[in-house]
Image: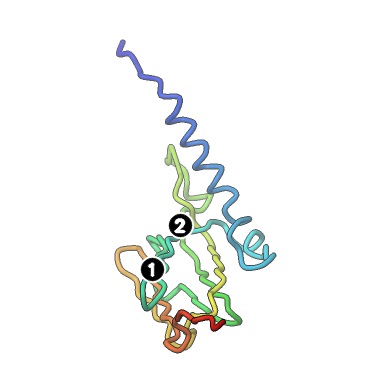
Amino acid sequence: MNPTRYESWRNMHHLRSELDRLFEPYRNQAGDDQSSVATCDWTPAVDIKEEKERYVLRADIPGVDPKEIEIIAENGVLTIRGNRPGETRDNRAGYSRVERPCGTFYRRFSLPDTADLAQISARSANGVLEIGIPKLTHTLSRTIKIEG
């Protein structure tokens, strides 16, 4: 019999990750809009980065045809939604584990006032959706001297 190493912290980290994923639809939503809670089956992981001239949003959406993803920017909110087909309950026979989420996904993000909604672009490669949101050029910050 081979000894099995028990790693309690790894289990705690896994539990924390699962709880974070479970409660993700309730956090980071624009305003008090909870519509994604009722309208989605899963939420893709998203990274948001601010660069000098733009904001970049990267979402992990493997297995989804880019033509099936809808991206809408209106009223200062960016919405991403789509559907990932998966195994139906009838087709799960023979599987010992089914962990990959499938079905509809939906994410909303508040956009800063400096976002140029007219110039947003998106591309998809290797299961990662990248959305580029340029900054408006006339809203770049400046230092104002106080006269006294």
Q: Secondary structure at mark 2?
A: loop
The residue type indicated by label 1 comes to: Leu
Residue, disc 2: 45
Quarter of the image with the N terminus in it: top left
Residues at circles 1 and 2 in contact by the CB criterion of under 8 Å: no
For marks 1 and 2, the one nearer the N-term is 2
Q: Quadrant of residue 36?
A: bottom right
Quarter of the image with the C terminus in it: bottom right
**Residue placed most toward the observer, 1 or 57:** 57
Residue 16 in picture, x, y percent from top left: 52, 39
Q: Does 45 sit above or below residue 2?
A: below
Residue 30 in picture, x, y percent from top left: 62, 68
The residue type indicated by label 2 comes to: Ala
Residue, disc 1: 129
Q: Does 52 sit above or below residue 21?
A: below
Q: Residue furthest front?
A: 148
- Left or right of 34 in this view: 44: left
Q: Does 84 sit above or below residue 94?
A: below
Q: Residue furthest top?
A: 1
